[in-house]
Image (cartoon, coloured by chain):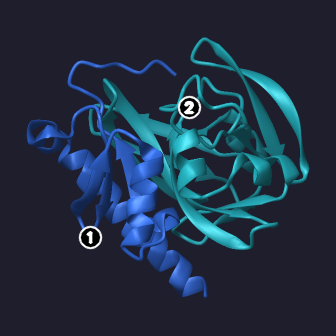
Chain colours: A cyan, B blue
């Protein structure tokens, strides 16, 4: 059994489970640290506009990356995301997973949208989420 | 290379931890409603426009990709995902 420790912090009005990882986009060949809210209500893993800007990925570069566009409803509003297939998520303990992530292409409507680690991650890795808000403890468990 | 990348993640996690543990201090310090960049457990740049902050980080010779930047939501604000 492998364990990925997660952080529990009060953020934007509530306790949130957060995961930090290195995101590697094959076409850029560099790894960028990301902190994402673990969101079991989100079917997708999404890199928010702030993290896209930190990564210095322009909209033009995003459009050029290999992947397809798709409409997504986020926070009650519809945005178009680009699904980037060739990405890796690497966690502190050395665990690494290949999985697609989505970047909003039109981010003007919700610039504060945080990055999300969605249920797609749990499905892809078989991870189970343990979350005890009282003790502020959380982790993913992944069977070998 | 691998060690260097893990070291980047470790520094990022340390600065994230500092941000979340000091969020009320940041609010009291006038950072509410602003983006703040944290490095070595202290705020280095803040402002309302993320593009300007990123340019200021670059002007300091730092790579914004490796710097923890977050928005300081005002007290009482709730974000529904």
Q: Are marks 1 and 2 on the same chain?
A: no
In percent of width and height, residue B75 lies at: 20, 24
What residue is drawn where x is 63% and y is 66%? A95
What is the chain letter for disc 2?
A: A
Q: Can you see residue A57?
A: yes
- The residue singled out by tag 2 in the image is A39
Up-down: is A126 above or below B72? below
The correct choice, above or below, for A48 with respect to B5 in the image is above
- Which residue is nearer to you in this view: B66 or B10? B66
Q: Up-down: is B32 above or below A25? A: above
Residue at image x 9%, y 37%? B28
Question: Which residue is found at the position 60% from the left and 23% from the top?
Answer: A41
Q: Say what secondary structure mark 1 lies in.
A: loop
The picture quadrant where one finds residue B11 is bottom left
Quadrant in the picture for residue A103 = top right
Screen quadrant of the N terminus of chain A: bottom right
Estimate the x, y position of residue B8 in percent, counting from the top left: 47, 74
Residue visible at 40% across and 70% down in the picture: B59
Which image quarter is the C terminus of chain A in? bottom right
Return the chain for callout 1. B
Q: Distance between the residues labelled 1 and 2?
A: 28 Å
Circle count: 2
Residue B15 locus on image (x, y percent) = 31, 61
Helix, strand, or loop for circle 2? loop
| Nearest to the observer: residue A10 or residue A61 | A61
Work out whether residue A99 can be spotted. no
In the rendered view, tell whether residue A102 sits above or below residue A58: above
Classed neighbour count for the residue bearing mark 1: other residues with Cα under 10 Å, few (<14), some (14–19), many (≥20): few
């Amino acid at each position: 059994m492998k364990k990925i420790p997660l952080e529990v912090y009060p953020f934007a009005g509530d306790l949130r489970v957060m995961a930090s990882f290195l995101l590697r986009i094959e076409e850029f060949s560099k790894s960028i640290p990301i902190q994402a809210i673990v969101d079991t209500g989100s079917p997708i893993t999404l890199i928010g506009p702030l993290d896209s800007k930190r990564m210095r990925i322009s909209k033009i570069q995003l459009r050029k990356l290999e992947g397809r566009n798709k409409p997504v409803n986020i926070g009650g509003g519809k945005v178009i995301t680009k699904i980037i297939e060739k990405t890796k998520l690497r966690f502190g303990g050395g665990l690494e997973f290949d999985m697609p992530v989505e970047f909003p292409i039109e981010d003007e409507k919700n610039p504060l949208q945080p990055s999300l680690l969605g249920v797609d991650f749990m499905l892809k890795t078989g991870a189970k989420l343990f979350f005890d808000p009282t003790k502020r403890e959380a982790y993913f468990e992944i069977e070998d | 290379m691998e060690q260097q990348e893990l070291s980047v993640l470790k520094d990022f996690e340390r600065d994230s931890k500092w941000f979340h543990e000091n969020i009320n201090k940041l609010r009291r310090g006038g950072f509410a409603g602003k983006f703040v960049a944290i490095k070595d457990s202290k705020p280095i740049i803040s402002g309302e426009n993320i593009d300007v902050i990123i340019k200021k980080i670059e002007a300091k010779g730092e790579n914004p990709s490796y710097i923890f930047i977050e928005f300081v939501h005002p007290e009482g604000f709730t974000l529904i995902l």
